Image (spheres, rainbow, N blue to C red):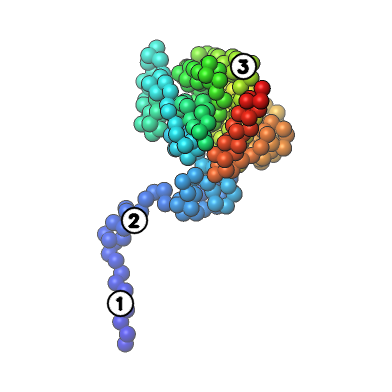
Amino acid sequence: MLQSRFKMPSREELKKRMDNIPDNIMKECPVCHATFFSMRAGKQRICPNCGFGFRITAKRRAKITFDAFDELDANLTVPKQYQDEKYLAKVAKGKKVTGIKESVLTGIGTLADMKVAAGIMDPFFIMGSLGSATGEKITRLFEKATSERLPVVMFTASGGARMQEGIHSLMQMAKVSQAVEAHSKAGLLYVVVLCDPTTGGVTASFAMQGDIILAESHALIGFAGRRVIEQTIMKKPPKNFQRAETVLEHGFVDAIVQRNDLKQVLTNLLSLHKKEDANG
């Protein structure tokens, strides 16, 4: 009688093997619900089935988008006037997870030897919410771009205005919008890339004020949340009514661009604008 060479591992050995398997070895796409090995999402963190771009930190986006990136206002953070312990704990967690001190990373990026002022909102810093320091960083970015005659590329990913800062967070909408207007009057280019999710006060202000508005595939884009809308109109909106493809269909977005194509598309847009600016 043949004896099997396979030896059943003990319960302790099985547990040890399971403990060595990373928690994030598998991913499920929130859009198409496909399940796949995390490594298949690649450096760009894209669903291999439908092209949805998973949420990434601002620093990772800067790395995969620009040839070089020099950060501005790195130490700007929540003003000392806010002392609520729960709020400060969330801020501390955001700093630890993202490696930045506010929900937006700003700096001067380089694409094919062209300089561009860039703002990248981080969905892992209190859901990319718009606080007073966030607004200040973005405003300073636009002011620098205006004075140095640079185009601006803004990657938005936000849950909206930061409720912990009350009226001060809402005022950032007007503050940034004024800086955007001054940049526009100087005849400079402003490109927005709407990422998942772009909602609330960010959508209601600078996210929709770009000369060119791009969006990543299947990104959630809207103002109020689905439940709020349902309770207000007493109807159930269509399943994908706040996805980038639907927003494009209704004329609020100029184009949908896959994340792995964004660097080249932005380079092309900046090159065209540079030629037009040179020709007067």
Residue 53 visible at all:
yes
Name the residue tied to disc 1.
5
Name the residue tied to disc 3.
186
Residue extending furthest toward the top: 81
Instruction: Name which of mark 1 and mark 2 comes first in the sequence.
Output: 1
Of the 4 image quadrants, the one containing the N terminus is bottom left
- Residue positioned 48% across, 36% down in the render: 66
Secondary structure of the residue carrying tag 1 is loop
Q: Amino acid at mark 1?
A: Arg
Q: Amino acid at mark 3?
A: Ala
- Dot 1: few (<14), some (14–19), or many (≥20) neighbours within 10 Å? few
Q: Are marks 1 and 3 in contact (CB under 8 Å)?
A: no
Quarter of image, res 79 = top left
Nearer to the camera, 219 or 162: 219
Residue 261 on image: x %, y %: 57, 43
Residue 166 on image: x %, y %: 50, 15
Q: CA distance from mark 3 to mark 2?
A: 59 Å
Residue extending furthest toward the right: 250
Residue 197 on image: x %, y %: 56, 34
Secondary structure of the residue carrying tag 3 is loop
Q: Amino acid at mark 2?
A: Met
User: Label for residue 250?
Assistant: none
- In the image, residue 190 sits, relative to residue 246, either above or below, namely above
- Dot 3: few (<14), some (14–19), or many (≥20) neighbours within 10 Å? few
Name the residue tied to disc 2.
18
